[in-house]
């Protein structure tokens, strides 16, 4: 969740990130999160008369910038990324264009403080019965409900009577049973989230405070909540031509980053295990050569990743990886032999294969020599012809090759097709499939060999696949 650079998305998502020993101490997890953008959503619950569409703008860099135009009562602008900070937010009547903002007079201007790595919902409310038009900023729950639970949160945005006390309501079960935490809510207040069992019918009504048996102001339809569901109920209307009603606001959590670490660095013979530290915390212990870690679920951001001897905190090498929301990555540790420094090759999601075809990723992760002496070609085994122009591949390189479905028999060779031969296993690529062919080893600590990695990388350890 990186920011100001909302647009600072590294172009080298699939590139090589060199990890050089002796870099500064890794940034803490808190430091990572401090750089993550905020997300903000906007809900129109103001009783301004009928649908009363409004335009919402925020002042960014001194310029009023359109967020959404023509937002009607009950509608919501989904989460938008913004750098953390304080923003003047303005509401204008009607549906304005960006060009029209400069000459328009806002109905309301209010500062909104957005916290890093947090999701916040801005509710426009008021405008009737003596309640001025205003903005209520909700900080959405940072953690999902515990296992087997769901949650309910209630926001009171219904100015159906004059004076806060007269608007007091309770949220109770249909039989009048009180729900602790959802009682005596007045206009402009938010309560919850309150945990409720998932999968159990929830039959609620909203009544005047202290009158559980009275005719409900709003009777909600019975429903059961799924595990982890977060229901936000906004009571709105009751004035300005809008009937009393509940607006359900979805809670859309940020998609996590999914990161695994693959140990392809022949730093020693045998298991050659290493520990992996992410943002200063030991995330993986004793990862063996050719081992794949469990999935690490992280917030998006720029993380310092370090490799260390088991149990040690002094890094053998460290560097930064830019990890984007909703993406899956494999951080492959490579190098560490024959004068080639220990490095990480960040392998991200690839594009879909071409229609009816397959996609092959080719990675050179074999530090059998330094510099140009490590160059390799990829060739067809039957006639030693160059395969798809993949020649002079340097150590640490990654190539994406769209292919027709079929069986491919390939081998790595020295430049020009002679010298070193490293036969690969048969590659069976069916339509719509992706695979990664990696050459590993240094010829001393670990033998030179190819690996074929499945697209989903589900296996914990990849056994060497030898050629015929």
Image (cartoon, rainbow, N blue to C red):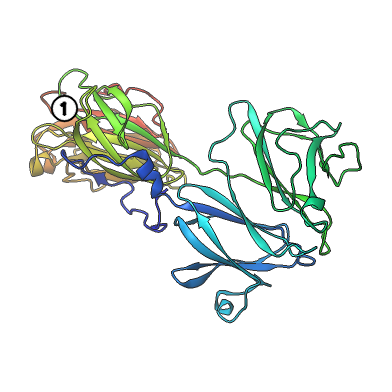
Q: Quadrant of residue 314?
A: top left
Mark 1 crowdedness (10 Å alpha carbons): few <14, some 14-19, many ≥20: many
Q: Residue 407: x, y in percent?
A: 35, 33
Give above or below for 129 relative to 367.
below
Which residue sits at x=46%, y=47%? Answer: 117
Identify the residue position indicated by label 1 in the image.
267
Foreground pick, 449 / 338: 338
Give above or below for 59 relative to 271.
below
Left or right position of 386 against 256: left
Question: Hey, which residue is sitting farthest top in the picture?
Answer: 270
Question: Hey, which residue is sitting farthest bottom in the picture?
Answer: 103
Q: Secondary structure at mark 1?
A: loop
Q: Quadrant of the C terminus?
A: top left
Left or right position of 46 against 396: right
Q: Residue 125: x, y in percent?
A: 70, 59
Give above or below for 273 relative to 173.
above
Q: Quadrant of residue 212?
A: top right
């Amino acid at each position: 969740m990186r920011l100001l650079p909302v647009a600072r998305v590294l172009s080298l998502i699939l590139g090589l990130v060199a990890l050089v020993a002796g870099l500064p101490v890794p940034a803490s997890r808190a430091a990572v999160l401090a750089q993550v953008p905020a997300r903000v959503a906007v809900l129109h619950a103001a009783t301004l008369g009928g649908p009363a569409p409004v335009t919402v703008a925020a002042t960014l860099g001194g310029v009023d910038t359109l967020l959404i135009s023509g937002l009607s009562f009950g509608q919501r602008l989904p989460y938008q990324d913004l750098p953390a900070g304080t923003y003047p937010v303005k509401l204008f009547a009607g549906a304005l264009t960006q060009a029209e903002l400069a000459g328009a007079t806002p109905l309301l201007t209010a500062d909104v403080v957005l916290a890093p790595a947090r999701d916040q919902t801005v509710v426009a409310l008021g405008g009737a019965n003596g309640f001025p038009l205003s903005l209520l900023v909700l900080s959405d729950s940072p953690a999902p409900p515990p296992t087997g639970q769901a949650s309910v949160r209630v926001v009171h945005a219904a100015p159906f009577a004059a004076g806060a006390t007269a608007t007091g309501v309770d949220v109770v079960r249909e039989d009048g049973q009180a729900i602790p935490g959802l009682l005596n809510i007045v206009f402009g207040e938010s309560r919850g989230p309150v945990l409720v069992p998932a999968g159990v019918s929830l039959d609620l009504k909203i009544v005047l405070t202290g009158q559980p048996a009275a005719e409900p102001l709003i009777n909600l339809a019975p429903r059961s909540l799924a595990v982890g569901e977060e229901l936000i109920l906004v009571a709105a209307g009751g004035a300005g031509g809008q009937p009393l009603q509940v607006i359900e606001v979805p809670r859309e959590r940020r998609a996590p980053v999914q990161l695994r670490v693959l140990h392809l660095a022949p730093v020693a013979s045998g298991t050659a295990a290493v520990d992996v530290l992410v943002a200063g915390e030991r995330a993986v212990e004793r990862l063996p050569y050719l081992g794949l870690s469990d999935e690490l679920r992280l917030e998006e951001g720029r993380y310092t990743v370090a490799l260390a001897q088991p149990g040690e905190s002094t890094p053998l090498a460290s560097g930064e990886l830019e990890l984007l929301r909703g993406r899956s990555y494999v951080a492959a540790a490579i190098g560490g032999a024959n004068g080639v420094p220990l490095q990480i090759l960040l392998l991200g999601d690839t594009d879909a294969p071409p229609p009816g075809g397959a996609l092959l990723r080719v990675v050179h992760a074999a530090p059998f020599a330094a510099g140009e002496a490590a160059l390799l070609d990829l060739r067809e085994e039957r006639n030693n012809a160059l395969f798809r122009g993949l020649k002079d591949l340097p150590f640490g390189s990654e190539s994406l090759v769209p292919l027709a479905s079929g069986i491919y028999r390939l081998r790595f060779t020295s430049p020009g097709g002679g010298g070193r031969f490293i036969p690969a296993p048969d590659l069976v690529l069916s339509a719509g499939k992706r695979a990664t062919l990696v050459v590993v080893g240094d010829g001393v600590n670990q033998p030179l060999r190819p690996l074929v990695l499945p697209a989903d990388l589900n296996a914990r350890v990849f056994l060497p696949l030898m050629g015929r």
